[in-house]
Amino acid sequence: MKKIMTCLNVAVAALALWISVPGALAGQPGMHARNFSLNVSPDAKTDAITMGMLSMGTYPPADGEGNDYWPCFTGGSDADCSSIPAGALVIGIPYQDWNISACTSGVCGQIYLSFTSNHETGDVMVSETITQGSSTVYQSGTTNLGPGTAPFMSIVWDDIAMGPIACSGCVDPVKGPATIKATVTINSVTVSRSASIIMQE
């Protein structure tokens, strides 16, 4: 695991404020989340929901048990990262450039996003799209990832391909920039964040 992590992963330091790690919440096939309680009392002026990271990382191989090597939460909650001290997340390298052929012939990567709900308690609704201009090359639909009790922080990941093999109405990507957009809704509060990638041949 250490060799794989060195070559293919990045470790993202976790906040010291995380105080519990419930099990992963499964949504539609490919989209999952894990919530972390926060040992803080957010100020009333703090935004109800704030977006954190958004990136697309390499797709993981399977470990000896048939589970994805990453994302992997350290400190013993996930077997593949049990030798790493608690407080970190191992994910695939967040490349900017992606191969069109690889992404239109099968699953090629994972979208990662994080957000913090400071005040909203309720079901977490998440949707993701990748667009090029007015063309959609990937869309997840809206997924209910289960409830969260504020204040909490959540990390969401989604296995993706692109084009018609990925979703109805999607088209194959072409060379050039593409925009990933993730949207999170809890109750009547909706927030979103975008990130850029480049499709290459």
Image (cartoon, rainbow, N blue to C red):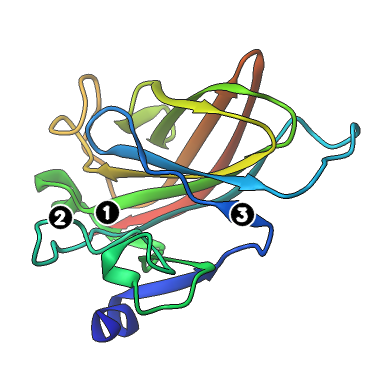
Residue at mark 2 to residue at mark 3: CA–CA distance: 39 Å
**Residue 108 locus on image (x, y percent):** 21, 53
Give the total of numbered labels.
Answer: 3
Disc on res. 52: none
* Quadrant in which residue 156 is drawn: top left
* Quadrant in which residue 98 is drawn: bottom left
Disc on res. 109: 1
Considering only vertical position in the picture, is 199 above or below 191? below
Disc on res. 102: 2
Camera-side mark, 2 or 3: 3
Considering only vertical position in the picture, is 200 above or below 124? below
Left or right position of 129 against 63: right
Q: Closer to the N terminus: mark 2 or mark 3?
A: 3
Element under label 1? strand
Q: Are marks 2 and 3 in contact (CB under 8 Å)?
A: no
Q: Which residue is mark 3?
A: 19
